[in-house]
Amino acid sequence: MASIAAHLRDILILPFTVTVIVPYFNYDSNDYRIPETVYLKVLGLIIGLAGLALFFYTVFLFKTVGKGTLAPWSEKQKLVVRGPYRYCRNPMITGVLFILIGEALALHSVSIFVWAFCFFIINTTYFLLSEEPALDKKFGEDYKEYKKHVSRWIPRLTPYRQNQAS
């Protein structure tokens, strides 16, 4: 099982870079701005906090169920099909996207919205070309069945249960 230090390292390398470092260097207070209203700022904070909660819950599931970290270079021992993974296949990335969208709204920044869109495209491409084929190979029929019933991005209305009938 991955250590707490490994989890912290991978959080700093990946989501911290995506949600703090890249927006910091892309943010320009003079760029085209979303209208500044207190409602958008509050909405951004709510969305960002929801994303943060979703992200940390999925990291917890990777540690306790998957026996690995969030990083692609960290081998997971088990397929994680609990919690938000019963509704969509990539809730961790959804959490990070919510954090970015929350930041964009709270800071009234179009450049952070553009970065969120780019992050989504990069991850979708990575999932299609690398992660999903690797999960097919590692977890076989369990992953194929899961993938057949649970969408990459659009959440199910009811939770997926392993070994459910087609």
Image (cartoon, rainbow, N blue to C red):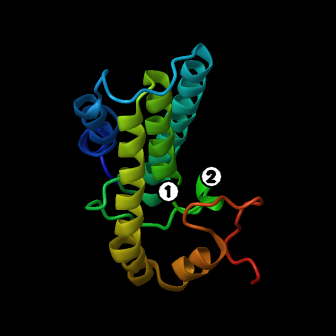
Residue at image point 31% right, 32% down: 20
Rendered location of residue 50, percent (x, y): 57, 34
Q: Which residue is mark 2?
A: 83
Residue at image point 31% right, 21% down: 29
13 lies left or right of 155: left
Q: Is residue 97 above or below residue 36?
A: below
Q: Estimate the spatial distance between the alpha carbons at disc 1 and disc 2, rounded to whole Å.
A: 11 Å
Disc number at residue 47? none
Type of residue at label 2? Answer: Gly
Callout 1 touching callout 2 (CB < 8 Å): no
Q: Work out which quarter of the rendered image holds the N terminus and state it.
A: bottom left
Name the element at disc 2: helix
Residue sitting nearer the eye, 147 or 42 = 42
The answer to which of marks 1 and 2 sits earlier in the sequence is 1
Name the element at disc 1: helix
Q: Which residue is mark 1?
A: 65
72 lies left or right of 140: left
In the rendered image, the residue lying farthest to the top is 38
Type of residue at label 1? Answer: Val
Residue at image point 41% right, 35% down: 110
